[in-house]
Amino acid sequence: MAEPAAGSTTHREQPETLRLLAVHAHPDDESSKGAATAARYAAEGVDVLVATCTGGERGDILNPGFGEGPEDIEGMRALRRVEMAAAARALGVRQQWLGFVDSGLPEGDPLPPLPEGSFGLVPLEEAAAPLVELVREFRPHVVTTYDPSGGYPHPDHVMCHRVAFEAFHAAGDPDRYRREGGAAPWSPLKLYYNHDFSMNRIRTLHEAMQGAGLESPFGDWVESRSAREIPEREVTTRVHVARYYAQRDAALIAHASQIDPDGFFFAIPRDLEVDVWPFEEFELAESRVPTQLPEDDLFAGVRELVASEGAAS
């Protein structure tokens, strides 16, 4: 196990409640990436907190059944906050905004510049500062976020990875991100990347749909050249979550301006999904506790440490 940074809070002082911090770019990302895992751990008594980097202000109305949405950024921000609160209730988790402005998804060739003041343009230390403080206040044992690619090339997803990676490493260092009256340093024990949109998952569900004689929503994706060029990252951890798919789906539907209940996310029959893909996958990026791979628990190695230190205190 790596030594905590000098002067950081030791985990011996930690209460026995396990804590998970899931860092996401926009409202609705928490419901499509690791959502059933968050719901499972919350149901099991883990304190689960979602940190949302931006307000999703530049998201479009993607649900054709929603009707007309707000025409201005402030109105969209208010709508997304209402939806986020409903999604958090569905998952049984807490949620906190980091306060940055959605960059939008630039399109065109060449790509246009990002809007001034948006999350993707904020200097790293400025963007990471509120998350560092949140890590120190919440003191998570485990942090989840996106891999370095962002999962897909949205500037906010890439920045979300950078910010979470920075906070994981800096929050335990008392010489970094000093703030008068701020919380004491804290070093999380494990960092994971979500793998919800891996091509392995997409292909597995696609082939299962075809085998059942059903039309797959993934046909064009699986057969496209761009899909074949998506690198497969290492999967270290599979968390079984089939019992929590209903909560995941309810959280998705709560984002009514973004998620079409008759659309892509609901095209796979749930009984088929449970049969062929009853888990969510993660990549263990870093661990400060011993653990054996593959895992079936994000808290593998952490539970033992917290239990032993609780007994010793």
Image (cartoon, rainbow, N blue to C red):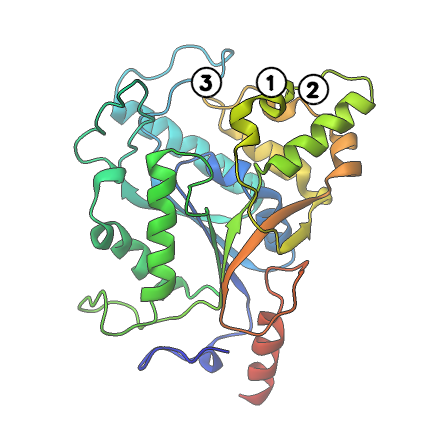
Q: Between marks 2 and 3, how big is the CA–CA gap?
A: 21 Å
Badge 3: few (under 14), some or many (20 or more) residues near its Cα, within 10 Å? Answer: some
Q: Which residue is drawn at 53% across and 88% down?
A: 313
Judge from the rendering whether residue 247 lies leftward or rightward of residue 148; answer left or right: right
**Disc nearest the viewer among 2 and 3:** 2
Q: Residue at x 62, y 21 (%)?
A: 223
Q: Which residue is drawn at 44% across and 67% down?
A: 188
Q: For mark 1, what is the residue?
A: 220
Q: Do the residues labelled 1 and 2 touch (CB within 8 Å)?
A: no
The kind of residue on which mark 1 rests is: Asp
The kind of residue on which mark 3 rests is: Leu
Using the rendered view, name the quadrant where residue 113 is placed.
Answer: top left
**Residue 84 position in % (x across, y down):** 44, 36
Secondary structure state at the residue bearing disc 2? loop
Q: Reading the chain from its start, which is encountered first: label 3 or label 1?
A: 3
Q: Nearer the viewer, residue 92 or 227?
A: 227
